[in-house]
Image (cartoon, grey):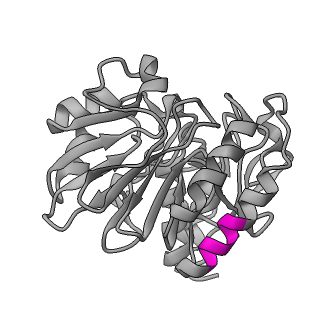
Amino acid sequence: MNEHAAEAGWFVDDRCTNCDVARQLAPGLIGEVDGHSEILRQPRDAAELGQVYAAAHACPTRSIRHTARTLDPALDPFPLALTDDVQLCGHNSPHLAGANSYLLRRPSGTRMMIDTPRWSTALARRYEAPGPVTDVLLTHRDHAAHGRRYADHFGARLWIHEDDLDAAPDADQILRGTDPVEIADSVIAHPLPGHTRGSVLYLADQRYCFSGDSFYWSRGTGDIEVPESVTWYSIEELAASLARTADLLHFEWLLPGHGDRKHLPAAEMAQRMRQLTLRSATFKQQPINFGAVRW
């Protein structure tokens, strides 16, 4: 073992909700065992230790822990750059079931926040440090927690669809109907009823797709999937939404709320979206079952 052997001692406590966040950030080090995350092996070098720290700082239940020390805030990597234009917020909130949230940089240097991390004033200051945040874009009702607090702190506009408005009744920008709407230069909101009645995905720069909980990348199947077993409104409506919308979506980065992220050539993403649309037409509504999600 090298000088990082002293970092042995990482474990996952019993508060884990199997949200998959830690496994996305530390693949090969943290894995799913019997319906929850576990440390598969201890980090062996600085890069792997960084992955474990990212997982620990993102975990919504703070379940990634060390036997001998608390988390070092100096090793908090968030917001974490995914590209020059997109950062992963981390610090996932238990009030959003551990959903991922993002910052999208615009050419002016301002940013948009898509869904929200856990709330604190210190985190809000951290997220606005690279540049002003002008908009908080909510993908659906399940991710509405903290939206108003972040929007008020930033002096930003808060967006949600009218069919999920009761989850954020003080939103000041209301999306309506099912037609796509350009809400900023090269940022288009596509209403996508299905997961909830007011679900929305946001497409930016014909490169980034912030899909909320409508679809995600599954490491298990190696493909884009919909959360068949966690569709609150209607799986049939989601299939219809995909049939109406899939051909309008040109993107390279799939950036969901729950489930993994993926970067592929736009042509391959388009083909996979067409295949997903065909598959989803055969799906039937299921009882809600978080344990059946194909991470």
**Quadrant for the N terminus in the image:** bottom right
Q: In this view, does 142 lie above or below 3?
A: above
Residue plotted at (53% across, 39% down)? 60
Q: Where is residue 141 in the image (x, y as percent from the top left)?
A: 50, 28
Image mark count: 0
Left or right, 192 with reference to 119: right
Residue plotted at (76% across, 36% down)? 290
**Quadrant for the C terminus in the image:** bottom right
Please provide the residue range marked out in magenta: 268-274
Q: Position of residue 193 (x, y in %)?
A: 58, 37
Residue plotted at (18% across, 33% down)? 153
In magenta stretch: residue 89: no
Q: Position of residue 195 (x, y in %)?
A: 64, 37
Residue situated in front as seen by the camera: 171 or 260: 171
Residue situated in front as seen by the camera: 198 or 101: 198
- Name the main secondary structure of what is drawn in magenta: helix
Residue plotted at (44% across, 50% down)? 71
Left or right, 253 with reference to 151: right
Left or right, 46 with reference to 17: left
Left or right, 69 with reference to 275: left
Kindly tell me whether residue 77 is visible in this rendering: no
Residue situated in front as seen by the camera: 139 or 59: 139
Kindly tell me whether residue 212 is visible in this rendering: yes
Q: Position of residue 79 (x, y in %)?
A: 34, 58
Residue situated in front as seen by the camera: 24 or 152: 152
Q: Is residue 221 above or below residue 190?
A: below
In magenta stretch: residue 272: yes
Q: In this view, does 112 lie above or below 273?
A: above
